[in-house]
Structure formats: structure tokens, C-alpha cells
Image: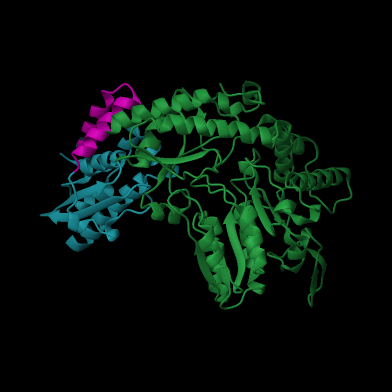
Chain colours: A cyan, B green
């Protein structure tokens, strides 16, 4: 599946929930399935700045595709990064660079896009895209 | 039942924001240590200013300018009386506590030399750390820290040991924003004076909750922010003893702060104008005065008593939740509870209870050294005001239990 298709799938999953509580419960569940970063990559260099909780992200190439792993000390943050990684992982760097992230709003997590939340969703997206830019340069 | 001298339901009528809903639930506002809410009396003063006498102050000879000047200087008098300063000229309008502290820290560049020492407490807000670090960088002075214990109480014997002839300044908050501890400034101040050091007390967190008398305290500098005192943001005050303010050089240059200007030399205006360059936040200053009027109608003693009862009740309720650990357990506290639930990140709790309409602060509270001391990423901080109720605390406890259930 391409990024858009995965995002549509996530939007479909979230549309089954009527209220915020179910959405958050599901997000907490998704957090538990996050592809975890290896301990050796959990360094200060890999921490995403701008988050109230700690978020570590690592990226590496598998063939032409970028694969992300991550972790966080907060469960909801883990859920958010899990959703992002699900849509970006195993994709080509250029596709990640070009990807839209409006689906975050559609799944009812708009508040996390606000910089005042200090949860760093915006920083997370930026960091994932920066990885993609870095690897794209390498591929070129 | 809480016996109270104040009629909470009538008081709540004064705060329109308390009627609003957040995420479909009635707002429960427990982030008062960050910003207090604004009563309509204060909003009226703002509307009245812009509707009737908006003008620049001090120089205009027309009626509006005179009315605005009278109101602004009248607000200065209200601040003077609120803190019981000896003279109105000892009250400097600033943009808030951070500005007040920077003004003093900048001025002290003149008085501090290499090897001098500045003491700060271990529980300061970044605003009362960084300006002093900058002062030390400029002058070669040394910053030393008065340590605290696990309860969040300053170690006074260690403080005594740190004091010496080299100590030129002691800076400390009256109340810790991260822990709620009321520091024993009535002891801290004379001990500093005994070695010839000046004292600045950050009153941002104390002034809304405790009656402050700067003359009785004999403090050299005291600061406050209007937005924590039911006033607007962007305005605050610096109290300084006249003898200190007279010695301190101006912070910023510009209009208002001068006596005479030629290209060869400028002479500065008298106090307090020497420190008030440029057109000030006139409306904000007037509204600050209106906010103090409002607080005076309730009375700081009554506020203190009621908030203490809220603190006791909330602490009792909170400690019944399994895994709750409170940071800051001094006997002397304002109505601030900083806590965590074992195994749960404060951010997760803050996010979920926001969905239930409850506003608390999570994170480091601009006091990273305090969090580092406890080796925690942050806390959940519930801070109460006189318009909060026991029923709101009950809802808060219910919400916490729900969030805990979801996260475990």
C-alpha cells in the first residue's frame, strides 16, 4: 500500500469510534504495537525536540525503502508516533517527503497538531521527513 | 463542610469563563498558578478605558490624557497599598515578573564584580535563574544554590553556610511554582542583610494567595505579575526600596525616562519614571489596579483560608488514589499540588483529563532543576484559586481515576 492508502485505512479504523475515549483507547493500543527502536539507538541525538515526553526515532534503509522504529516514555505519544510510522514506514524517501498529513485532523487528533500541546506531533512529522530528505540525498 | 467567609457561588458569577464548556464538559480550571481567570469587573475597566479615556499619559494637556494619567497613577497607588510599600515611587510598572527580575539583574551589573556571589534557591522558576546566570557571565560573579530536601523545603543551615562577605545578592521565590512551598523569607531576608547582601523575592506565586507587606519583610526587591492576580497578561510590577532604585542604573532608554536630552548628555527622570521608558501598557496597568480592588473586596485573609481548605481536601482525596506521589510536602504550602501517578507519564494524564474538561499543567513548570532533583520528567500540577470548589475537586479525582484506568 502507498502512504495515501495506509492513511485512508487509519481514517476508516478511527471512523468506527463515536467518542474521544474510544479513539484514545485505540491509540493507546496502537502505541503498544509500535515497532520499537533498538536500545543502542535510544541516544540523546535521536530524541525529537519539542515534545513534553521523550520520543526517540531511528530510520534506516531496507532496499529503496525507509524503515522507522521509535519509542516514547508516554503512552499517548507512543500511539501518535505509531500512527505516523505506520503511514511512513516501508516507503520510498521521496514519497515520505511529498506525503500529506491531513489525516491526523480527520482521525480526530487535531488538537495534537497545535504547537501549544507541546507534544511535538509537528516536530515528529518534521523529523520523519528530515530523515527522508537525508536518505533521499544519499540515494541520489 | 468548608466554612467559608466568602460566597463562592456569587464569586463564580463574576467569572464568565467558568460557565464555558471544554470538550463537552463544564470547564474545571486548575491551572491558576500559570494564569488566573479574569473577573468582569476587570474586563469592565478595560472596556471603560478604551471607550472613554484612551490617551497617552503624562504629557498631554487635554482632558483624556489627564484622566488616563490619573487612572494609571491611581493604579500605582493601589499596587503600593496592596503590598504596603512606603512610597508610590517604589513601584515600577513592568511587563511582568520576568521583566522585573531582568531589570534588577541588569542594573546589578554595576555593583557586582568578579568573585562576588549570588545565591539562588534550588526551587526557582527559570525566570529567576537565567537572568542571574547572565549577570554572573557578564561580571565573573559566582552563582551558588541554596539546596532543598525531599519535602521541597530549603535547608536553612546550608543557606547559613553559603552566606559570606562575598554574597552580594540572595534571590528566592516566596512560593515555588513547581511545588507550592512557601519559603521562610522572613528568615532568609535578615540573614542576607546580616552579611550585607541585597534580597530579591519573586512574588509571582505568593501575591495572589498571601498578604504581603514589603516594609515588614524589609525586602529590597519584590516582584509580581498581574495575570496571576486576576489581572491581564503583559503587566506586572517591581517593588524596590527607594535607596536601591535610586542607585540602580536605567534598564532601557527612551521617552518618559528622561529629564533632559541633548546629543552630548541625557539626564534621567526621577523614580519611578527612570525605569519606565516608552509608552507603557496603560490599559493593563489600570486593569491591574482594578484586579487588586477586586481581590481586596474578597480579602486576602479570606482567600488564604479558603484555598488552604481546598488544598487540604484535594490532598486527602488525591492520596487515596493508589500510586499517587506528591512532590512538595512542606507544611507551609499554597494551594498547589504537584504529583505523579506511578508508572504513568504526566503528559498522558494531562491529555486525557483535558478531554474531560479539566485544565491542569503538566511538564517541568519552567523549573527543570526541581524535576532533575526528583529525577522525574515532570509532574501534573493542579493549582487552585478562590473560585474553585470542592465539587470540582471531586470531578477532578473522578477524571484521574478514569484516566488511570485507561492508561494502565
Please give the name of the residue rendered at 20% of the width and 54% of the height, measured from the top-left corner. A59
- Using the image, determine if residue A97 lies above or below residue B388: below
Q: Would you say residue B178 is visible in this rendering?
A: yes
Asked whether B86 or B255 is in front, the reply is B86
| Residue A18 drawn in magenta | yes
Task: Please state, as top left, top right, bottom left or bottom right, where the C terminus of chain B lies in the image.
Answer: top left
Instruction: Say which quarter of the image contains residue B294.
Output: top right
Instruction: Say which quarter of the image contains residue B275.
Output: bottom right
Q: Main secondary structure of the magenta part?
A: helix
Asked whether B108 or A132 is in front, the reply is B108
Furthest-front residue in this view: B157
Magenta highlight range: A6-34
- Using the image, determine if residue A140 lies above or below residue B305: below
For residue B277, side relative to residue B354 (left or right)? right
For residue B75, side relative to residue B383 (left or right)? right
Please give the name of the residue rendered at 32% of the width and 53% of the height, measured from the top-left corner. A48
| Residue B220 drawn in magenta | no
Residue B11 on image: x %, y %: 65, 25
Instruction: Say which quarter of the image contains residue B207.
Output: top right
Q: Would you say residue B256 is visible in this rendering?
A: no
Count how many numbered circles sit on residues in the image.
0
Residue B302 on image: x %, y %: 66, 32
- Using the image, determine if residue B336 lies above or below residue B170: above
Task: Please state, as top left, top right, bottom left or bottom right, where the N terminus of chain B lies in the image.
Answer: top right
Please give the name of the residue rendered at 78% of the width and 58% of the height, measured from the top-left corner. B272
Residue B105 on image: x %, y %: 62, 65
For residue A119, side relative to residue B22 (left or right)? left
Residue B291 on image: x %, y %: 70, 38
Amino acid at each position: 500500500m502507498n502512504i495515501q492508502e495506509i492513511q485512508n485505512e487509519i481514517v476508516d479504523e478511527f471512523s468506527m469510534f463515536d467518542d474521544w475515549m474510544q479513539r484514545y483507547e485505540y491509540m493507546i493500543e496502537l502505541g503498544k504495537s509500535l515497532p520499537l527502536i533498538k536500545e543502542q539507538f535510544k541516544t540523546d541525538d535521536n530524541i525529537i525536540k519539542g515534545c513534553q515526553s521523550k520520543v526517540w526515532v531511528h530510520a534506516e534503509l531496507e532496499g529503496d525503502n525507509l524503515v522507522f522504529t521509535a519509542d516514547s516514555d508516554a503512552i499517548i505519544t507512543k500511539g501518535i508516533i505509531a500512527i505516523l510510522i505506520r503511514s511512513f514506514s516501508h516507503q520510498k524517501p521521496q514519497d515520505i517527503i511529498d506525503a500529506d498529513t491531513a489525516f491526523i485532523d480527520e482521525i480526530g487528533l487535531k488538537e495534537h497538531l497545535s504547537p501549544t500541546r507541546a507534544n511535538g506531533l509537528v516536530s515528529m512529522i518534521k523529523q520523519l521527513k528530515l530523515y527522508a530528505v537525508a536518505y533521499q540525498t544519499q540515494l541520489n | 463542610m468548608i466554612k467559608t467567609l466568602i460566597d463562592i457561588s456569587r464569586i463564580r458569577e463574576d467569572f464568565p469563563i467558568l460557565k464555558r464548556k471544554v470538550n463537552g464538559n463544564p470547564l474545571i480550571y486548575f491551572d491558576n498558578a500559570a494564569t488566573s481567570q479574569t473577573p468582569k469587573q476587570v474586563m469592565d475597566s478595560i472596556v471603560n478605558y478604551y471607550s472613554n479615556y484612551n490617551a497617552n499619559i503624562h504629557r498631554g494637556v487635554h482632558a483624556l490624557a489627564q484622566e488616563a494619567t490619573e487612572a494609571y497613577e491611581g493604579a500605582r497607588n493601589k499596587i503600593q497599598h496592596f503590598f504596603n510599600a512606603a512610597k508610590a515611587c517604589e513601584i515600577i510598572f513592568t511587563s511582568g515578573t520576568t521583566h522585573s527580575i531582568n531589570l534588577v539583574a541588569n542594573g546589578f551589573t554595576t555593583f557586582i564584580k568578579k568573585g562576588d556571589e549570588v545565591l539562588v534557591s534550588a526551587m526557582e522558576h527559570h525566570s529567576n535563574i537565567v537572568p542571574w546566570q547572565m549577570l554572573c557571565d557578564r561580571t565573573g560573579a559566582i552563582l551558588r544554590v541554596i539546596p532543598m530536601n525531599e519535602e521541597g523545603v530549603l535547608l536553612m543551615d546550608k543557606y547559613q553556610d553559603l552566606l559570606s562577605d562575598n554574597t552580594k545578592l540572595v534571590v528566592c521565590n516566596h512560593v515555588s511554582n513547581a511545588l507550592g512551598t512557601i519559603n521562610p523569607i522572613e528568615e532568609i531576608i535578615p540573614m542576607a542583610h546580616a552579611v550585607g547582601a541585597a534580597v530579591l523575592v519573586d512574588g509571582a506565586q505568593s501575591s495572589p494567595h498571601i498578604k504581603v507587606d514589603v516594609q515588614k519583610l524589609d525586602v529590597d526587591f519584590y516582584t509580581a505579575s498581574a495575570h496571576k492576580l486576576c489581572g491581564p497578561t503583559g503587566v506586572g510590577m517591581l517593588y524596590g526600596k527607594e535607596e536601591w532604585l535610586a542607585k540602580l542604573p536605567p534598564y532601557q532608554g527612551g521617552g518618559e525616562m528622561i529629564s533632559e536630552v541633548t546629543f552630548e548628555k541625557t539626564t534621567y527622570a526621577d523614580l519611578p519614571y527612570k525605569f519606565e521608558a516608552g509608552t507603557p501598557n496603560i490599559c493593563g496597568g489600570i486593569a491591574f489596579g482594578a484586579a487588586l480592588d477586586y481581590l481586596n473586596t474578597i480579602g486576602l485573609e479570606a482567600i488564604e483560608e479558603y484555598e488552604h481548605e481546598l488544598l487540604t481536601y484535594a490532598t486527602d482525596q488525591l492520596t487515596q488514589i493508589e500510586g499517587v506521589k506528591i512532590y512538595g510536602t512542606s507544611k507551609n504550602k499554597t494551594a498547589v499540588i504537584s504529583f505523579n501517578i506511578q508508572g504513568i507519564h504526566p503528559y498522558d494524564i494531562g491529555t486525557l483529563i483535558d478531554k474531560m474538561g479539566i485544565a491542569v499543567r503538566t511538564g517541568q513548570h519552567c523549573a527543570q532543576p526541581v524535576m532533575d532533583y526528583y529525577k522525574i520528567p515532570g509532574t501534573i500540577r493542579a493549582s487552585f484559586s478562590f473560585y474553585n470548589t470542592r465539587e470540582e475537586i471531586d470531578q477532578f479525582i473522578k477524571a484521574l481515576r478514569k484516566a488511570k484506568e485507561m492508561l494502565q
